[in-house]
Amino acid sequence: MRFGLLRHLPQTLRFQLTFWNTIVILVLVGAALWGVREGLRWTLLNEQDRSLTEDVRQVELTIDAFGSDWDKVAAELGPKVESNSDRGWFVRIFSTGGDLLWSSENAPELSVPVARAVRAGAYSRENYRLLQQPIPAGGHSPPLIVRVGVRRDPIDEDILRLTEMMLTAFAFILVMAPLSGYWLAGRATRPLATILQTTERLHPDNLSERLPLRGSGDELDQLSATLNGMLDRLANYLEQQRLFVANAAHELRSPLTAMRTAVEVALQRDRGNSEYRELLADTIEECSGLSNLINHLLLLAEGDAGLLHADGEVSLDELILRAIDMFQGIAEQRGIHLHAEASEGILVSGNRVHLREVIHNLVDNALKFTSAEGSVSVGVQRMSEGKEVQLRVRDTGEGIPAEDLPKVFERFYRADKSRHRDRPIGGNGLGLSICRAIVHSYGGQIAVSSTLGKGTTVTVTLLASQETTMQRE
């Protein structure tokens, strides 16, 4: 309920900054003015108390000189009482029991409690400031209590004038604080208005516009720079997605067009059974290629959606040996030496089918881009701390130019020109993209290094399973 009214106020950032800044300023200024007022009042009273202390000392010296001869005391103190009549200065002398022994003529009748009447110290009563001190017995007088007083009117008047000036200053600040605060809040939030207007104009079809930077280096400038970086990444991602869709459509359209053309040609006239069987065989082959392409696209989509997860422990050395056995015939046919360098009992966290896909893609790529008499090696080893496992696939092919290395993981990218060989190279350019999607999903890393004329090395770093880590420890 206390903040219920605040919900009905404007909810703009500019108004809220103005409102709360004004509240804080008024509270701080009010507290500072009150502190100055009370500090001045305490200072004036303290100064008045020091003056009364000197007066008490003078009265004490007079009593020491004349004793209990109050006529002489009155005669001695009379000029001081007369000269300070405008201040209402007076003296009263009491016995230690509180009985009044002598009083100056102008002494007011103040209702002082009995307990207070014999106690030493300074205090205020009505509009007077009083100072009371005991005087020890002297040669001519017994122990006494001296009360000296003076009116507080000058101090109260000074405090009143100061209070009026402070109230005037507070009223001025009360008016100017929200006005100046609203203006300053407008200057502070102006970049936010620019950010809102620019982002409102942005559209997925046009992400070329960027937020202006003022060069101030403040948080709003940093926000603009951060948003610009995000827009760059979004634009790059959307461009990659457009290219991906276009390339996928092209890859799907080509075999479909080929199958439709073949079927249309076959239907133009009657043909023999052998021709129909050949047509069906070609169609099955094209369908198989389409099926592989669709499976690869689905695997990439699952990787983008974060659906690829490690679901158990996989023996990486076993997968490598099986891959070597499977590709050995192709390697021998092409005159390539294919061998493995794998230790036993290397377990990683992952999915067996997905990791097999990674190994097969890397070995297949290495064989494609390696000439006869070359070699391809597949090695796996534990890292020094035992928490990671590295898989390396090396070939002695032509290598990849440095300018093409950042592109090898792009979808549908084919490095045929950079790794040229005499024989035509198939594939749809998704192999390394799929490898990266799988490896990253398992929290690993994949990197490619290459030297022209010497070969290429693909390094995959995977997380070792807990069992492998425990064995290492």
Image (tube, rainbow, N blue to C red):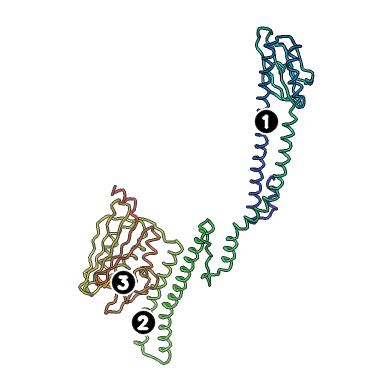
| Residue 282 disc label | 2
Q: Quadrant of residue 275?
A: bottom left
Of the residues under marks 2 and 3, which one precedes in the sequence?
2
For the residues bearing labels 2 and 3, Cβ distance under 8 angstroms? no
Identify residue for label 1. Answer: 44
Q: Is residue 349 above or below residue 374?
A: above
SS of the residue under disc 2: helix
Q: Is residue 237 above or below residue 473?
A: below
SS of the residue under disc 3: loop
Q: Quadrant of residue 342?
A: bottom left
Of the residues under marks 3 and 1, which one precedes in the sequence?
1
From the viewer's side, name the closer residue of 319 and 244: 244
Residue visible at 41% across and 89% down in the picture: 265
Q: Position of residue 420 (x, y in %)?
A: 29, 77
Q: CA distance from mark 1 to mark 2?
A: 111 Å
Residue visible at 73% across and 21% down in the picture: 80
| Residue 401 disc label | 3
Q: Nearer the viewer, mark 1 or mark 2?
A: 1
Q: Is residue 13 visible?
A: no
Q: Position of residue 331 (x, y in %)?
A: 24, 72
Q: Position of residue 144 (x, y in %)?
A: 69, 12
Left or right, residue 38 beside residue 433: right
